[in-house]
Image (tube, rainbow, N blue to C red):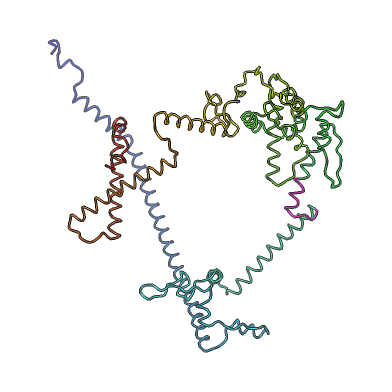
Amino acid sequence: MDPDYIPSLASKTRQERKAERKKKRREEREATKDERAAKAAATKAKMEAKAKRREEVREAKKKRRVERKEMKKQIHVKLEGERKAAKAADAAGAPSAATNEAAEAGEEVAPQPTVDDIATGADEIKLAVTRKGRVKKVPGIGPVDKYPTKADKRRVKLEAQAMREGITYEELIEHMAKEQSEKDAENEAELVELRKKRGGLTNREYRRLRREAIIERDHAEILKRLGIEPAKQTNGATDVGSSIGTSANGTNGDAAMSATATIAAITKPLLENISETRLAKYKKRAEEKGLSVEDYVVHREVKKATSDGREVPAALAIAAELSKPDTNGLIGSTVSASVVGTAAPAAASGTNAGTSDAAALGDNASFGFVVDTTGDPNILQTSTAPLVGGVPLDPKVWEGRPVKSLTKAERKARLEWMRHRRALRKERRGVVALTKKERSRKRMEKKTAVQNRLMAGLIAERRKAGATAEPNKQEIKEARRKARREMREMKRERKRLGKGERQKLGDWLDRARH
């Protein structure tokens, strides 16, 4: 201890600081006393109001429950009285009210079915009887000799509705029929007015003709931009195939046009009506398929028209024909690359002259080759690699690219390549490669063998305990349940171990079999 330390001259003691804190807390509580009291009173009032509201809701529910019960009772009494009256009339042999009305109107009255007829009828299903000998009841109707039909259920509901409204069942039916007729008249007036505006066409006919008119308008716009005079066929359709084809193939002198320019002119109005976001998506998909955005849009529109069952427009059909890959199988009208060879120049021009060039060369026909001047990674030498879905089994296709960015065909090829490589690796190790289905079946056989062994042990323990009779079905079921529980426990124990210990122990099924 410091010799110069003097307690009287030191700072405040612990007791003094504690007293000051207590005094400060008392002052704070005194300052907020009124505020806390008001808050407590508000909370109490809120809780009381909530309890009062809850009690009111409970009383209202109780009141509604009593009213519904009383109403059901009245309906049941009424139906029971009608049923007893009808039964008494049948026992006395008196005809029913419906039969009397039909007879008075001079209509032919069908013979009433007997009990046997009802019992053997296909639409009359007898209700079962409970173990106590009571006939089962139908909710809302009571004990009956057959299941109620939809008409019976609807009649019961309408009778209850009529009773609530204080009118008879017949008056309610008449009122509902009147409302429906007024509604039908209003709808019919609207339909007549709409058909008058559409020239007497139905909705389906109007939509079909409107769609065809839009297509024809687009065709006319395409022909106008191409500068081609439309020729009319006998059926009124526009025959643009021959004129576009003649212009595209260059057989019309100065009006010759390349395939790429023709496709661009045909697809220009289609691309103008596409939003920027959708156009960006189309460009991305076109790049994945190795197409230009014009070719992609053409193929998409043709596919859409075919799936809808519509006739493919002539202009789109010509564009689809021009955008097909050429006969040399290497370069289409959308690939930008320098081409050297015999058949390749015709392909680069966008025409289908490759076949004639190859025929002129005879057996020495060459398919040409590609010189990549832009560093395109998609142009690969795939002559020796096998194809899966049009994609070569070459890792260069997917190396350095995220798997999610690959197309479906590329993913399928990658999966097949990995499966083949895995099989070769297992073959070098002397392991028999199994398919997923074979592995699943083999593992299921292991599980069944382990389960049977555990069940046999449980049944053997039962016999050791003094049982002499053969196990019955219930005991075998109990043994199977215990065996499965034990197998689940084995699996949990293995999961509790670390990864290294699990690898040392191996498969828990192999251990459980011994």
Q: Quadrant of the C terminus?
A: top left
Q: Residue at x 38, y 53 (%)?
A: 51
Q: Quadrant of the N terminus?
A: top left
Q: Residue furthest front?
A: 363
Q: How far across and how far down the image is residue 75, in percent?
A: 49, 74
Q: Residue at x 52, y 74 (%)?
A: 124
Q: How far across and how far down the image is residue 56, in percent?
A: 41, 58
- In this rendering, position of residue 399 left or right of residue 488: right
Q: Quadrant of residue 499?
A: top left
Q: Quadrant of residue 178?
A: bottom right
Q: Is residue 489 magenta?
A: no
Judging depth in this view, the residue of 20 and 419 nearest the camera is 419
Q: Is residue 220 above or below residue 118?
A: above
Q: Dominant secondary structure of the magenta stretch?
A: helix
- In the rendered image, is residue 165 in sight? no
Q: Is residue 209 magenta?
A: yes
- In this rendering, position of residue 254 left or right of residue 50: right
Q: Magenta residues?
A: 199-211
Q: How far across and how far down the image is residue 297, in percent?
A: 69, 34
